[in-house]
Every structure is written in C-alpha cells, then in structure tokens.
Image: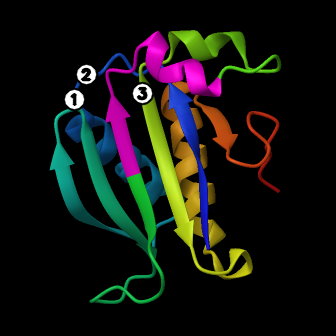
Amino acid sequence: MAYLMGWFARSGEPVAQRIAPALLEAASRLEPDLVAVHVHDGVGTVDYEVFAGPTSPPAGVPVLLSVRTGLRAADLAHFIEPDSPAELLQCDTRIELILSGPFTDADWSIVRGLHRAAVELWDALLWDEMDGFAVTLG
C-alpha cells in the first residue's frame, strides 16, 4: 500500500534540482541520520529515495521524495477545495512523499524532518491524500 502526502510552497525557485538539496540539507540538520539517494532528474522535477539511518548501503524501506517546480493554477486545480488555504494559488512548488508498505511501518522521523524543513524554509502547506489540507502530524 502507498500513502501520498507532501507540501505546497512558494519557493520562487524554478529549478527543482536546487530546491531538493536545500530541503534535504535543512532536514538533515533536524534529523541527522537522514540519507538521500538521487534516483531521477527531469525538467522541473527531481526524485530521491530517503532513508533513516547512517548505514551504507541504507537499510529499511525508503520514502520517495519528489520535488516539482513551475506549478501553475491549472496544476493546482485538482487540490482546490472549499477548505483549501488561500495561499495555495500562490504556490509554485510541490514536494511530494510516497510512503510504501504498511502505514505503521513508515519511518515518521523522515516525514517529521522534511516537514519541519519545508515549513522552516518556505512556510509550506501540508497536504495528504486522505485529509487534504486538514491533515496534521502528531
């Protein structure tokens, strides 16, 4: 089973390959054992597998981190609901996490570190596929 969550941000940065390292660096200061492995580059997008723990090679089930820049209103239309924050329409960056496997097996230290970093860097808006923008991290 996969669980999709992430953040929307107004980064002002058109290059995803600059956003992701900044996010991972900030998250690593908050959660020092994060290990990120670059897996894909594209135009306006970059993907990493993120693990918790300093082992080499990394152990455990990774969280897939995908950063996409250059969002426009049409890209955001799917996420607009009556309770969506007004700031959503000003966002130009989507940071997405895909957690796979049983929900209880997810390494939430990865999610917490990335969440704190995204909020610290860009005052990012948290979103998930079940609760939308009403989601909270406990």
* Residue drawn where x is 31% and y is 36% of the image: 19
Q: Quadrant of the N terminus?
A: bottom right
Looking at the rendered structure, the kind of residue marked 1 is Val
Looking at the rendered structure, the kind of residue marked 2 is Pro
Spot occupied by residue 125 in the image (x, y as percentages of width and height): 63, 30
Q: Is residue 70 rendered magenta in the image?
A: yes
Distance, label 2 to label 1, CA atoms, is 4 Å
Q: How is the image coloured?
A: rainbow
Q: Quadrant of the C terminus?
A: bottom right
The reply to whether the C-beta atoms of the residues labelled 3 and 2 are less than 8 Å apart is: no
Tell me: 57 left or right of 111.
left
Spot occupied by residue 5 in the image (x, y as percentages of width and height): 61, 49
* Residue drawn where x is 40% and y is 22% of the image: 11
Spot occupied by residue 23 in the image (x, y as percentages of width and height): 40, 44
Q: Is residue 62 visible?
A: yes
Tell me: 112 left or right of 42.
right
Tell me: 63 left or right of 138.
left
Distance, label 3 to label 2, CA atoms, is 8 Å
The reply to whether the C-beta atoms of the residues labelled 2 and 1 are less than 8 Å apart is: yes
Q: Earlier in the sequence, mark 3 or mark 1?
A: 1
- Specify start and end residues of the magenta stretch as a single range: 66-79
Regarding mark 3 in the picture, which secondary structure is present there?
strand
Looking at the rendered structure, the kind of residue marked 3 is Thr
- Residue 136 vertical position relative to residue 54 in the rendered view, above or below: above
- Mark seen at residue 14: 2
* Residue drawn where x is 45% and y is 22% of the image: 75
Q: Which residue is mark 3?
A: 93
Spot occupied by residue 117 in the image (x, y as percentages of width and height): 52, 44
Q: Is residue 56 rendered magenta in the image?
A: no
Q: Which residue is mark 1?
A: 15
Q: How many marks can you see?
A: 3
